[in-house]
Image (cartoon, helix red, strand yellow):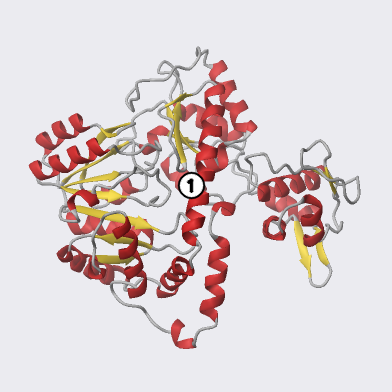
Amino acid sequence: MYIDSASPVATPCGNQDHVITINSKLPTPLVRQVYDALVDKINKGALRAGTKLESVRSLARHCGISTMTVTNAYNRLVAEGYIEARPASGYFVTAAISRTTVQRRKPFVGNTSVDSLWLLQRVYEDDATLLNAGCGWLPPDHLYIDGLRHALAGLARKQAASFASYGTPYGYLPLRQQVQTQLAARSIDAAPHQIVLTHGASQALDLVARCLLQSRDTVLVDDPGYCNLFPTLRALDVRLIGVERTPEGPDVEALQALAQRYRPKAFFTNTNLHNPTGGCCTPAASHQILRLAEQYDFRIVEDDIFAGLQPAAAHSIASLDQLQRVVHIGSFSKTISPTLRVGFVACNEDMAERLVYLKMASGLTTSELSEKLVHAVLVEGHHRAHLARLAENLAVEQRAVCDGLAAAGMRLFTRPTGGLFVWAGFAPDMVDVREVAQRAVAEGIMLAPGYLFRPDQQPSPWLRFNVGYSNDPRLYRFLAAQVRAFGAGPAKSPQASTRD
């Protein structure tokens, strides 16, 4: 196996019948490049069943990449049945029947209805055949896996008693104290007894909703907003009213009119690196939102799960009101590892007590093992540097994806300065993106159509793109073909609106 000499970082090595191309200057993660190159060779028969792959160390040396990168690529190939690991022998290409089994997992055969239920069922599947351009999480190589590995090793050396506890109702105290320190750095004062650890941000949102709301209450939400929040709220039999989102945050004039008309109990909003638009709430908008909450007596539930990745000028509404009317939600799942499922709620003392009661009544304590792992990662000392590198990498990927989408004829809601998401769409006179998403399925591309992010699921010309996965020529070619097929003219920078 050797590296294609056309690459600016290429070095020839190994058997020339097994050529792969690795280019460290491409935005595509190196793990994905190694994986894709080998899958392509296996599927085309260039690497036949029984062929022994180059060793991890050898391939890493020849490619000029880390052994961890090669190991991660090989592990994924093993998990998906392309290769097998033989003890003391190495990695070998499996029989074709195994690969056929893997390929049958492709969801892109026959009629498929791209709706919210299908998206929830498919989006979390680990399918290497899928270009998951619309998903909501970071690629594996963006996560802090090394820090998690060290934390696991350290925890494994502790006494067995460390693994024998249910944990406490509020959650692991040292981690709550670490959250207190992190919030203080963002000008939010919260004592440990004002912080409740949860099973990710999803449970945090659910507990807060059940604590604040009763049947037939009116709730305001971002429009577009976090799609998984909407079924959580509907299950409580409350009325959802969307507040139009602008590049500067929620439309405060619309918010005032809706608050005056409906007298809502709460407003659930995603302040920074908004899901799905990628924008951040301006200080002026935050002050206005808090003023309206005081005037019309509703709570603000601030979802801030990407804290640490936002631009330096970003802020939170909680820092303006110090958790009197604002409930602040955070998570470590996005930036450390989603397998940990550790989030938190910071709120006033009375509400924290009610949240703990609901938490214990519905599922007892959260996993202290996961909470100890997160705590170990945070205090180990390198997590802050990881966040800085991650924020920088995402900013670079943002620029590349925004440029690629614009070149394909898409219009951008805004150009985010960082974070995971870009909100882009077609011209207003084009068909709803539901049809485009259906066509994408047949091409092996998972899109996230805009109507899924609206509380009423009304038609939308927008789509959410994940910059960690979307910088791919296949996606740009597909979108450009749709623009041509619908006869759209050159895309213009819109006066952003979710209601075109």
The image shows residue 169, relative to residue 183, as above or below, that is below
Q: Residue at x 42, y 59 (%)?
A: 332
Q: Residue at x 9, y 46 (%)?
A: 297
Q: Residue at x 14, y 47 (%)?
A: 265
Q: Residue at x 29, y 39 (%)?
A: 222
Towards the viewer: 371 or 242: 371
Instruction: Decide if residue 78 is in sight here.
Output: no
Q: Is residue 288 left or right of residue 334?
A: left
Q: Is residue 390 left or right of residue 344?
A: right
Residue 445 in the image: x percent, y percent? Answer: 58, 37
Quadrant location of the C terminus?
A: top left
Q: Is residue 497 left or right of residue 288?
A: right
Q: Secondary structure at mark 1?
A: helix
Determine crowd level at label 1: few under 14, some 14-19, many 20+ residues with C-alpha closer than 10 A: many
What residue is pinned by disc 1? Answer: 391
Which amino acid type is marked by label 1?
Ala
Residue 174 in the image: x percent, y percent? Answer: 35, 74
Residue 128 in the image: x percent, y percent? Answer: 64, 48
Q: Quadrant of residue 273?
A: top left
Towards the viewer: 365 or 279: 279
Residue 145 in the image: x percent, y percent? Answer: 56, 61
The image shows residue 472, relative to residue 267, as above or below, that is above
Instruction: Decide if residue 23 is in sight here.
Output: yes
The image shows residue 250, relative to residue 356, as above or below, that is above
Number of numbered callouts drawn:
1
